[in-house]
Each structure stands twice: as C-alpha cells, then as structure tokens.
Image (cartoon, rainbow, N blue to C red):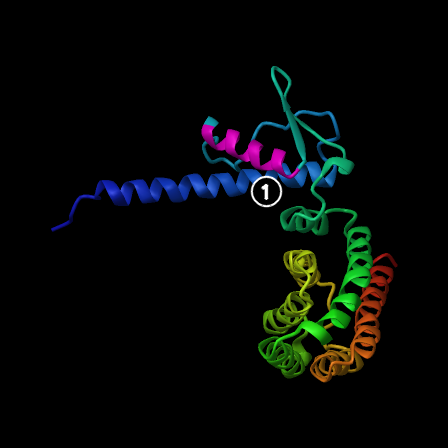
C-alpha cells in the first residue's frame, strides 16, 4: 500500500527546491556582476533558470540581500538592484573570491591573493613559533606529511585538503585573531587553484620540504627561520601561478 506524502516531507522537498533555486540564482547574478557581464550601474537581469520555473519574489529578494551584503549591488527604491563597481565589493568574501577565480581576470585575482599571503603568512609563521600549542604543531606536521603522501596528485582533493589544513592551522597558531579570520580566504584561494586546473599534477618537492621545515621550526621556537621559510613557500606559489598563467596565454 502506497502511503501519502506527509506534510512534513512535502515541506522539506519544497524547502530543498527553494534552496536550490536560491543557490542557482545567487551564483547566476553574482557571477554576472563579478565577470562584468552586468556593468556597474546596470540592473540585474531577469533570472535564467534553464527552463525551470522562475524563482519566487521571496527567493529573488533574499538573493538580492546576500549580494548587497557582499557589496556587489546597491538597492534603491524604484531603481531596483544595480551592480556596484569593484571598489565597493567585499573583496575578501570567500564566495566573491570564488567568482573572481571563475572570471576572465582570475590570474590578476590570484596574484593579489598571493600578495596578501606574502604579507600575512610569513608573519603568522614567526608568531606561531611563540604562540602555537602542541596541538597546533601536531596538526601542522600531520598536514605536511599528508601533502607529501599525496604529492603525486597535487591537483586532487586529498592534497588540497591537507594543504588547506596546513595553512589554516598556521594562521590560527599565530595567536592573531585577524590572521585566523583569513583562513577561509586562503582556503578559497587554494580551492580555486585546484578547481581551475592551476595546480601542477606533481607537487614541487622543495616546497613540500619547506612545509615540513616550517612545522619543525615552529616547534623549535625559531620564529625568524620559520618566517623566512614561509616566505619561500608563498613566493614559490606565486611563481608557479605566474608560470601557469604564461603557458595558458601562449
């Protein structure tokens, strides 16, 4: 005997559909602004749901609110939602970073993110030598070992997971809450490199040894050496991106 769908199940299914439409519309409109398809001052286009029914007013209103919180659009009475120039974007929002890395200027975005990392991560390594706990050091060491274990597949998920864990832990171990708050930014950067095939298949062995060395230097309490080695890591990463960018433009 087939039972009728319960009200709770129906509500759950409806909620899942609304969530899906919300995410799809957010991605559509956010990408349109970030890519430049919708220029500053222009209104957001009508939703394109690939043949599906148009999202409700509630969904469009919620999506517009999210985009407004990211600084991507301004909402005014009668004018509706219009795209903002890049200077008004919340440029460190992980979702904005992901859209930029999918856009036509991804290498410029990656270079800017590399410069941010160069300004922050070496200092975080130096501070970690004084502030890291035993748990921090153990996590850094485990992450470095996992990176080595998956180094022949540096463009795949297992390596990415270990890489993110290492750098996120480093920022947390610094004892600086501002640095720790950049964990999602660094994670989005590393994820974007993998998703858009900007990682080598085989990791650079020297860079891998530097990760292990940073963990050891932090454990030793040698802040100056940890800072210098971490600077080598971020410099190598930026050089690798520049090399890939050059190859892609030939």
User: Is residue 32 in sight in this rendering?
Assistant: yes
| Nearer to us in this view, 131 or 73 | 131
| Nearer to us in this view, 12 or 3 | 12
| Nearer to us in this view, 14 or 178 | 178
- In percent of width and height, residue 39 lies at 75, 31
- Residue at the far front in the pictured view: 130
- In percent of width and height, residue 4 lies at 18, 44
Q: Which residues are magenta?
A: 58-70
- Residue drawn 68% across the image and 79% down it: 151
- Residue drawn 60% across the image and 77% down it: 139
Q: Is residue 4 magenta?
A: no
- Residue at the far left in the pictured view: 1
Q: Is residue 188 above or below residue 146?
A: above
- Residue drawn 73% across the image and 84% down it: 220
Q: In this figure, which residue is indicated by the disc labeled 1?
A: 27
Callout 1 secondary element: helix
- In this picture, residue 3 sits left or right of residue 136: left
The quadrant in which residue 171 appears is: bottom right
- Residue drawn 46% across the image and 43% down it: 20
Q: Is residue 61 magenta?
A: yes
- In percent of width and height, residue 167 lies at 68, 68
């Amino acid at each position: 005997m087939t039972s009728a769908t319960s009200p709770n199940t129906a509500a759950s299914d409806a909620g899942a559909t609304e969530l899906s439409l919300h995410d799809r519309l957010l991605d559509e409109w956010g990408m349109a602004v970030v890519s430049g398809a919708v220029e500053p001052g222009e209104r957001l286009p009508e939703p394109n749901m690939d043949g599906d029914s148009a999202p409700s007013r509630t969904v469009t209103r919620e999506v517009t609110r999210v985009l407004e919180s990211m600084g991507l659009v301004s909402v005014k009475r009668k004018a509706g939602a219009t795209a903002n120039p890049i200077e008004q974007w919340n440029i460190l929002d992980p979702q904005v970073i992901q859209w930029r890395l999918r856009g036509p200027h991804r290498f410029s975005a990656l270079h800017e993110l590399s410069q941010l990392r160069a300004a922050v991560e070496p200092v975080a390594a130096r501070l970690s030598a004084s502030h890291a706990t035993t748990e921090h050091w153990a996590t850094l060491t485990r992450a470095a070992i996992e990176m080595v274990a998956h180094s022949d597949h540096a463009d795949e998920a297992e390596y990415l997971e270990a890489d993110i864990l290492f750098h996120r832990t480093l920022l947390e171990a610094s004892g600086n809450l501002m640095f720790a708050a950049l964990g999602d930014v660094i994670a989005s950067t590393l994820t974007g490199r993998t998703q858009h095939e900007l990682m080598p298949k085989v990791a650079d062995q020297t860079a891998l040894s530097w990760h292990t060395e940073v963990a050891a230097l932090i454990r030793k309490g040698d802040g100056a050496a940890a800072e210098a080695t971490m600077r080598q890591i971020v410099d190598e990463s930026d050089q690798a991106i520049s090399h890939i960018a050059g190859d892609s433009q030939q």
